[in-house]
Amino acid sequence: MLAWGRGMTLSIARSELILGGQKSGKSRRAEALAAAWLAASPKHGALLIATAQAHDEEMRQRIARHQSDRAGRVPRMQTLEEPRDLAGALAQHGAPDTLIVVDCLTLWLTQWAMPVAEMFDEKRAPAHDWPAQAALFFEVLAKTPGPVVLVRAFVDALGLLNQQAAQACERVTLMAAGLPLTLKDPP
């Protein structure tokens, strides 16, 4: 376990799903896990599999900002852009000494579900292949020999609203898989 801001500890699990609104700290936590992994051994590597695609200028700028920020925080983490074939990327790059961060599952699903993206990339498979692709991804995930961190994002505004609401409320509870996790409790 390693320290991670404000007395929190950081431990690396074989796999971790990070949930939360945009701007809630999901990517930062994934980067902190990668940095801790890299610091633990000079033999360790870290790979970010980015699922976003820049179909417009706003997204190009957002991706460039994320790349620049990430390079400053975790300079040894490599990046692979793979918007669709996560199973193939995990199978090819998974190794016992490599931590893989997938950022993000929401955009990965969007790449499969949104037919408008077909006009940007002729190699895309039809969206009806999504169930098979998802099943293959989870099969490969279970077999990946090194740690894997999965990030799931939502809308920017929701993340900022959640931060403000959490500051204003006495108790904050995160519900995941039907289980309550108390994030903040009254003193």
Image (cartoon, grey):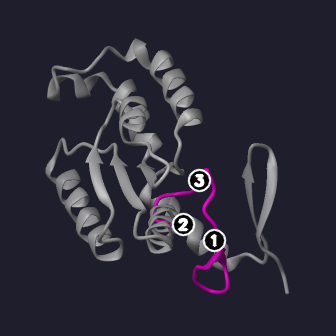
Determine the CA span between mark 1 and mark 2.
6 Å
Query: Which numbered tag is attached to residue 19?
Result: 3
Q: Image point 37% across, 42% down: which residue?
A: 93
Q: CA distance from mark 3 to mark 1?
A: 17 Å
Task: Please state, as top left, top right, bottom left or bottom right, where the C terminus lies in the image.
Answer: bottom right
* Residue position for label 1: 165
* Residue pictured at 41% horizontal, 12% vertical: 128
User: Which stretch is magenta?
Assistant: 1-25
Q: Quadrant of the N terminus?
A: bottom right
SS category of the residue bearing label 3? loop
Query: Looking at the image, which residue sits at the far front?
Result: 43
Is 18 a magenta residue? yes
Q: Secondary structure at mark 1?
A: helix
Does residue 153 show up magenta in the picture? no
Residue 181: horizontal and vertical position, in percent?
Answer: 78, 60
The three-letter code of the residue at mark 3 reads Leu
Q: Residue at x 45, y 41 (%)?
A: 106
Query: On the image, which quarter does residue 69 sit in?
Result: bottom left
Q: Residue at x 51, y 66 (%)?
A: 33
Closest to the observer, 114 or 15 = 15
Report if the CB atoms under discs 1 and 2 are less than 8 Å apart. Answer: yes
